[in-house]
Amino acid sequence: QVQLVESGGGLVQAGGSLRLSCAASGDTICISDMGWYRQAPGKERELVAGITNGGSTSYKDGVKGRFTISRDNARNMLFLQMNSLKAEDTAVYYCNAYMATPCIDGAVGYWGKGTLVTVSS
């Protein structure tokens, strides 16, 4: 089992920056890839940025160059640095952790409860 808790969301002016954090606990040695997702009201949840256990990153079109995903496995932390924020970035941001196949005991992944990012224009 893994528990994920996001923090760092809030209200920010367009063009500003926020740094989101995700703290993982539980069977953290079983965590493989991780990612940040976001969901706006009435919209589908979408992957914003992903990072493998080895540190390879990927980004949704439109955020690459503005957002940076990183992780500190020793501290069981995941981060998302968001710069040059736009109104369309407004959403609830969720942390996700995928489990290594040998560790899967029911759930293949875990979600945090989300942190709200509101960008005003």
Image (cartoon, grey):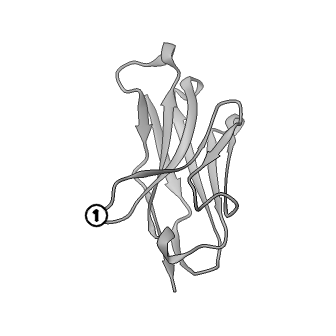
User: Which residue is depicted at the point 50% across and 13% down?
Assistant: 102
The quarter of the picture where the N terminus appears is top left
22 on left or right of 75 = left
Q: Which residue is mark 1?
A: 42
- Look at the picture and state if 96 lies above or below 105: below
Q: Position of residue 4 (x, y in %)?
A: 48, 43
Q: Position of residue 58 (x, y in %)?
A: 63, 44
- Look at the picture and state if 108 lies above or below 71: above
Q: Residue furthest front?
A: 61
Q: Residue furthest bottom?
A: 121
56 on left or right of 46 = right
User: Which residue is depicted at the point 50% across and 77% down?
Assistant: 87
The answer to which image quadrant residue 61 occupies is bottom right
69 or 65: nearer the viewer: 65
**What amino acid is at disc 1?**
Gly
- Judge the density around disc 1: few (<14), some (14-19), many (≥20) Cα neighbours within 10 Å: few
64 or 119: nearer the viewer: 64
The answer to which image quadrant residue 92 occupies is bottom left
User: Which residue is depicted at the point 52% across and 66% down?
Assistant: 9
